[in-house]
Amino acid sequence: MIPEAFAQSTVAREGDAGAAWLAELPEIIEDLLARWDCTVDGEVAYGQVGVVVPVRGAALKVSFPHPGNDHEPDAFEVWDGRGAVKLYERDDARYAMLLERAHPSTLFEYDEDVVTIAGVLHRQLTIPAPDGLPRLSAQADGWAEALRKDAAELDHPLPAAVVDAALAVVDDLGRNQPEILIHGDFHPRNILSADREPWLAIDPKGYVGDPAYDAAIFLRTRAYHLFVGEGLLAADLLRQLRAELGQFAEASGIDPERINRWLQLIAVQSSFWGRRHGFGRARGGSHLDQILRLIDELAISWTD
């Protein structure tokens, strides 16, 4: 029942804890299927941290126990189907949910009006936050500390003014954010086609924070797609991103200047992160070097 690729990546990331969880996972799934009276009717799918078992009329998701997944069901509960899949059942102790079933196709694979679709969907998700959810602002001190440390330790071409501009975003926007429920990981692969609505969000982190942060995360992912998928180089990519920023802002109702400033921060963070850890399938070599050169150019140009 457990896909081999998912098992391998989980052990590589989580070590012995991941292996122990994987050993228990088939029994966890069988128990939940019986408890929630579900019948499997498709192949098990998986993401980075969890598996999804298609069942009649729904989908069973079980994630590796990690603090980053703590508030996913809380966000679904508050949205109650508004812009996101519905939550039917939850088992927080086992990081499991029974969710509305959507299609496997994502907005990443769609070609038309992608940014506008995402912006309209995000407007639905932007609602007052309930009590008890983590504040994105709590990460601000860590962001600032990491920026200073990385700028000092890493071999990088970013001018001091670019790093200072990123630190200013942390001070100006990061420390005092609105009391709004945000997705926290809003990108095209976390937007699925569905029957009840054309598109629905999945995999939220459930933060309280600035909706413009979600917009910047979305556009960061778009930048990678435009570079790798469409082959746009820095100057053309920058023009396209600025146009898409305006489209997202108009569709979502978010202040474009706030999106612009969050992108300043995220571009510098991405430059440093890539140098320490790589990106996805680009862990090293010429492909990573190409991506880093592009990010550096964007970080400098975006600050200008």
Image: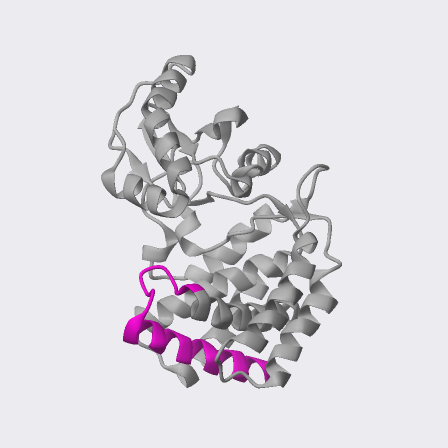
* Lateral position of residue 275 relative to residue 230, left or right: right
**Residue at the image position 56 percent from the left and 57 percent from the top:** 214
Q: Is residue 93 above or below residue 253?
A: above
Whether residue 66 is in magenta: the answer is no
**Residue at the image position 52 percent from the left and 50 percent from the top:** 121
Count of marks, rendered view = 0
Q: Quadrant of residue 234?
A: bottom left
**From the image, which quarter does the N terminus lie in?**
top left
Magenta region = 277-304
**From the image, which quarter does the C terminus lie in?**
bottom right
Q: Of residues 45 and 280, which is closer to you in this image?
A: 280
* Lateral position of residue 289 relative to residue 92, left or right: left
Decide if residue 85 is in sight here.
yes
In the rendered image, residue 215, in percent from the top left (x then y), is placed at: 55, 61
In the rendered image, residue 172, in percent from the top left (x then y), is placed at: 74, 68
Whether residue 285 is in magenta: the answer is yes
Q: Quadrant of residue 2?
A: top left
* Lateral position of residue 219 relative to residue 75, left or right: left
Q: Main secondary structure of the magenta part?
A: helix
Q: Quadrant of residue 148?
A: bottom right
